[in-house]
Amino acid sequence: MAHSRMAGSQPRSSHALQGILLRSIAVVFFALMSAAMKWASEGGASLVELVFFRSAVGLPVTLAWLALGPGIGAVRTKRPGAHLLRSMIGMVSLTMLYQGLMLLPIADAVTIGFSAPAFATLLSVLVLHEKVGPHRWAAVAIGFLGVFIVARPSGSALPLAGIVYTLLGAAASAAATVTIREMSRVETHGSIVFWFFLSTTLVSGVGMLFHSAPHPPFTWALLLFGGVTGAAAQLLLTRALQVAPVSVVAPFDYTQIIWAALLGWLIWSTLPGLNTAIGAALIIASGLATAWREHRLHKDMVAATPPIE
């Protein structure tokens, strides 16, 4: 009997480790995508081009994943209006976060973007009418205190516009998370991702007619690389959630801050200051406290999720 219990527990442990590994790799790819897109913008790529390559490259990858897995029929939807709303919110989030990324050091942009779970808690009260206790309100307050410290409003070396864009993007990302939580009751993850990528590709494709310009080969390569790594990260993120609980894998999202800091040092020779380190610690503590509380209450968790979708 003891042997039976041990044999049964091994797959669960193995799945948890697999989910953690997949999520950790996804986070590395998200950091690489952020760095590539920021670098491309410095090479002359416009905001519209960043958004277009992120979505246009992700669309065929998503279709291939659907064809090999649940089938193309998974994109059927019973709620086209909900998909339209989610896609509009997602486009706002993506646009704002990329604009902030273009203006801020990568580590600061990623760190502020992780305020999304705090915004999601606020929106879950306003939109889903969830009850939030003092523990979660305290976590929200700690998260926003972390953002305040990173932003350094008094004598900040960071451009105010970049901070505002990133906060707006985080808020929109939280709104997308809340919308997805509500849609997931009847819609598949594959359909949600597909319709978002299709909508964003079509809208940004129209924008490309007016905002696309010739670039050096290296800039085009960065845009393509950003699209590929973003698509790969999305698939790895999805697979991680299929093999392990959100409560197990979501805390590893925050390692993206470390990877962003490393890439910022390697590419731009910049390192996060003390304010960013302290603020990041508070934001991470806020996110983990929220995740743990929701896990204890057996609720769908407001996962951290990397800030750029």
Image (cartoon, grey):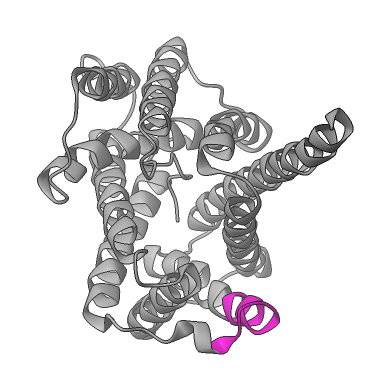
**Residue 201 part of the magenta segment:** no
Q: Nearer the viewer, residue 100 or 66?
A: 66
Residue 225 vs 99, above or below: the answer is: below
Query: Measuring 61% from the left and 79% from the top, which residue is drawn there?
Result: 70
* Horizontal side, residue 171 vs residue 2: left or right: left
The span shown in magenta is 60-72
Dividing the picture into quadrants, the one containing residue 165 is top left
Depth check: give the residue in front, 107 or 288. 288
Residue 182: percent from left, percent from top: 28, 60
Task: Indicate whether 82 appears above or below 144.
Answer: below
Residue at 56% x, 72% y: name it: 58
User: Which of the two residues, 104 or 63, is positioned nearer the viewer here?
Assistant: 63
Give residue 299's position: percent from left, percent from top.
Answer: 36, 41
| Residue 176, image x, y percentages | 30, 57
Q: Is residue 273 left or right of residue 178?
A: right
Q: Along the horizontal axis of the image, is 59 left or right of 145?
A: right
Which residue is pictured at 52% across the width and 89% down the height?
73
145 left or right of 194? left
What secondary structure do most residues of the magenta stretch adopt?
helix
At x 76%, y 36%, the residue is 9
Q: Quadrant of residue 227?
A: bottom right
**Residue nearer the viewer, 77 or 170:** 77
Query: Split into 4 quadrants, where in the image is the N terminus?
Result: top right
- Residue 170 at x, y = what percent? 31, 44
Q: Is residue 38 above or below residue 158?
A: below
Q: Residue furthest front?
A: 1
Total marks drawn? Answer: 0
Vertical side of 68 occupied by 27: above or below: above
